[in-house]
Image (tube, rainbow, N blue to C red):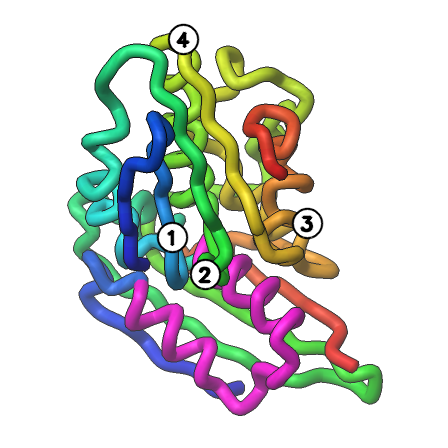
Amino acid sequence: MIKKRFNPIKDKSSEIIEFLMSSPDIPEDDVLRFKLRLSIEEAVDNVVRYAYDGGIGWLEVGTKIEGDSPVLVIELRDAGVPFNPLERADPDVSLGAEEREIGGLGIFLCKQMMDSICYRYEDGNNVLTMTKKIV
Amino acid sequence: MNVNISNQEGKTIVRLDGRLDTSNVEQFQQDIAPLMQGEKPNIEIDCTGMTYTSSQGLRMFLMMQKSVMSRGGKMVMIHMNPQVKEVFDITGFSNIIAIL
């Protein structure tokens, strides 16, 4: 896995996103890159903004290619407050502007753009794994 | 993200260029501040050059839509590229904001 640990991460979202997007594991196809950038931004920004009180802490990100299909795997690991973003209810996308709340869209977009997204709490770390088949 | 605001025949034209993401959303909010005041605004957002938006951008457009509605005005987004449109479709924002 190609990976890097960023520490501290306060205000570092862009740098972390660009590190992942420049990985040789990320395909060149523009349509796919759009979906991957969106998923990466939402997942990274979630950790940078909310995982640590005051944003002081680390985030390790990485990519790898698995299988013959092949499948791109993107992993995020942090030691912040235990938080499973997948437990949050999806926003009600049928509501009008007045009722719509500002928030809750990020992880929902990840779920829509990626093939799978999994969360586990391991050795005191939040680990988020997202996969996308790349053809 | 470049934001260019001009007025034409009583209509406010907002031209967007580039990516709207977490790196520039705060600047964007400052750039659109002039659009958040005045009665019965008539705003057209030209998305020809907008190549990307994340949920940070969607929040801004929702905020604008709510503000415009509360002032009895209207807002329309035009020339949105297919991938940005997909983000609006998936999140139901296509039903909240007029897209031509």
Disc 1 sits on a residue from what chain? B
> What range of the chain is rendered magenta?
A14-42
Q: Is residue A41 magenta?
A: yes
Disc 4 sits on a residue from what chain? B
User: Quick one: SS at disc 1?
Assistant: strand
Q: Is residue A104 magenta?
A: no
The type of residue carrying mark 2 is Gly
Residue B88: x and y in percent read 60, 41
Which label sits in the foreground, 3 or 1? 1
The type of residue carrying mark 3 is Gln
Number of numbered callouts drawn? 4
The type of residue carrying mark 1 is Leu
Q: Mark 1 vs mark 2: tell me if same chain.
A: yes
Task: Determine the CA span between mark 3 and mark 2.
Answer: 24 Å
Q: Few, some or many C-alpha atoms within 10 Å of disc 2 (few <14, some 14-19, many ≥20)?
A: some
Q: Few, some or many C-alpha atoms within 10 Å of disc 4 (few <14, some 14-19, many ≥20)?
A: few
Q: Counting residues from the N terminus, which is met first, the one under dot 1 or under dot 4?
A: 1
Q: Few, some or many C-alpha atoms within 10 Å of disc 3 (few <14, some 14-19, many ≥20)?
A: some
Q: Which residue is mark 1?
A: B16
User: Quick one: SS at disc 4?
Assistant: loop
Q: Which residue is mark 4?
A: B72
Q: Mark 4 vs mark 3: tell me if same chain.
A: no
Q: Which residue is mark 3?
A: A112
Task: Determine the CA span between mark 4 and mark 3.
Answer: 34 Å
Q: Which residue occupies 51% across, 32% down?
A: B76
Labels 3 & 2 near each other (Cβ < 8 A) = no
Q: Mark 1 vs mark 4: tell me if same chain.
A: yes
- Up/down of B100 relative to A9, above or below: above
Q: Few, some or many C-alpha atoms within 10 Å of disc 1 (few <14, some 14-19, many ≥20)?
A: many
Q: Mark 3 vs mark 2: tell me if same chain.
A: no
Q: Which residue occupies 44% across, 36% down?
A: B44
